[in-house]
Amino acid sequence: MPEKLNRRQFVVAGTGTGVLASTRVFTSAPQVITRGVKPAVVAAANGNRSKDGAGLTCVAKAFKMITGGADVLDACIAGVNIVELDPDDTSVGYGGLPNADGVVQLDASVMHGPKKSGGAVACLEGVRTPSLVAKKVMEETDHVLLVGRDAQRFARNMGFTIEDDLNTPKSRELYLEWKRRTDPDHYLNLRDRAQRGYQVALEMVAEGKIDPDHFHGTINCNAVNSKGEICGTTTTSGLAWKIPGRVGDSPILGAGLYVDGEIGAAGSTGRGEANLFSLASFLIVESMRQGKPPKDAGMAALQRIKSQTVAKRLLNSRGQPNFGVTFYILNVKGEYAGVTMYNPNENSTFAVCTENGPQNVKLEPLLTGSAAD
Ligand code: GLY
């Protein structure tokens, strides 16, 4: 071992940890000093609601695991598994609101920053934890995305239990209410029927029958450990009562989730179609690569979505988007932000866990007022 590291040796040693060391002269055996990233986990608001048997929420569980040395992606997935398995969360996994035929179809993606790899499943039926199947796609295949019946067959081959029906009494009851109200026999045109279905669902949100966060549903969870290793996952039952086969942004890398191990991570909840059109999670990570802090990167992506929204049916009376979309953003330095199109009463939060414990942090809105006005 050399007594001192020259500049090049120093940089190489630091890079191997995923972060560069601060300036320091080594006078004895070389020692890799990390930048001392403060570990952090961010997630959608439901990341601080459902709890496991030990009383931990998604973000608390993931934080405990990353600070205990677990792989960061395993920690994110273990966190969202709590929400996927919670029958009371009607936006994710078991008990997620079904499609227009009453069938629960799930989407999920995972990305591993240091390994520069990812996997996803879409329209998966019968498996409560699609995030774990997405990880298997990443680990066990040469592919990134498996869909539908074949994704289910893959899951069966990987040893997952396949269930006939992931509805719960709660999700079935809400489906029947929606079905009764829409009476699809009167809507011969598929587009009119879908539009009517959307309107009825919004009415049910306005009446408080469905939590607004659970209409498009979803949980995204991103985490970074003290070495700057960053990963994320997004998992959802998708838009409530969607046309069967509809896939949202969650399983599409770059849309519902994007992670670059050198830069950061972003993931979303809300209207997936808007995000699919802009690939906003990718855009956010690219903006951070250009030097923007997480909040500014997120606001730029929301602005992009706003400027791409021109269809009348998607605009409110002020000519602004009539839907919500939210991003959860974390960089490799442990800096984070949660940004959203609207936060009318400042009530909407996202979940964070740091050394200070789990917290609900206010989402920063791009626009004032509400989506509906
Ligand atoms: N963002 C979830 C979805 O639109 O499916």
Image (cartoon, helix red, strand yellow):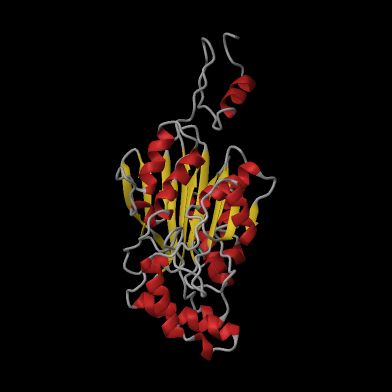
Judging depth in this view, the residue of 163 and 343 nearest the camera is: 163
What residue is shown at x 58% (from left), y 65% (from top)?
247
Considering every residue shown, the one lying at the far front of the view is 164
Quadrant where the N terminus is found in the figure: top right
What residue is shown at x 60% (from left), y 9% (from top)?
2
Considering every residue shown, the one lying at the far right of the view is 142
Residue 280: percent from left, percent from top:
57, 59
Residue 359: percent from left, percent from top:
32, 49
* Residue 98 visible in rendering: yes
Q: Answer above or below: position of 226 versus 123.
A: above
Considering every residue shown, the one lying at the far bottom of the view is 186
Judging depth in this view, the residue of 328 and 148 nearest the camera is: 148
Residue 286: percent from left, percent from top:
60, 51
Q: Answer above or below: position of 346 versus 39.
A: below
* Residue 38 visible in rendering: no
Please count the marks in the image. Answer: 0
Q: Quadrant of residue 11?
A: top right
Q: Answer above or below: position of 309 versus 334.
A: below
Residue 277: percent from left, percent from top:
61, 66
What residue is shown at x 41% (from left), y 55% (from top)?
44
Q: In the displayed structure, does residue 270 sit left or right of residue 356?
A: right
Q: Quadrant of residue 37?
A: top left
Quadrant where the C terminus is found in the figure: bottom left
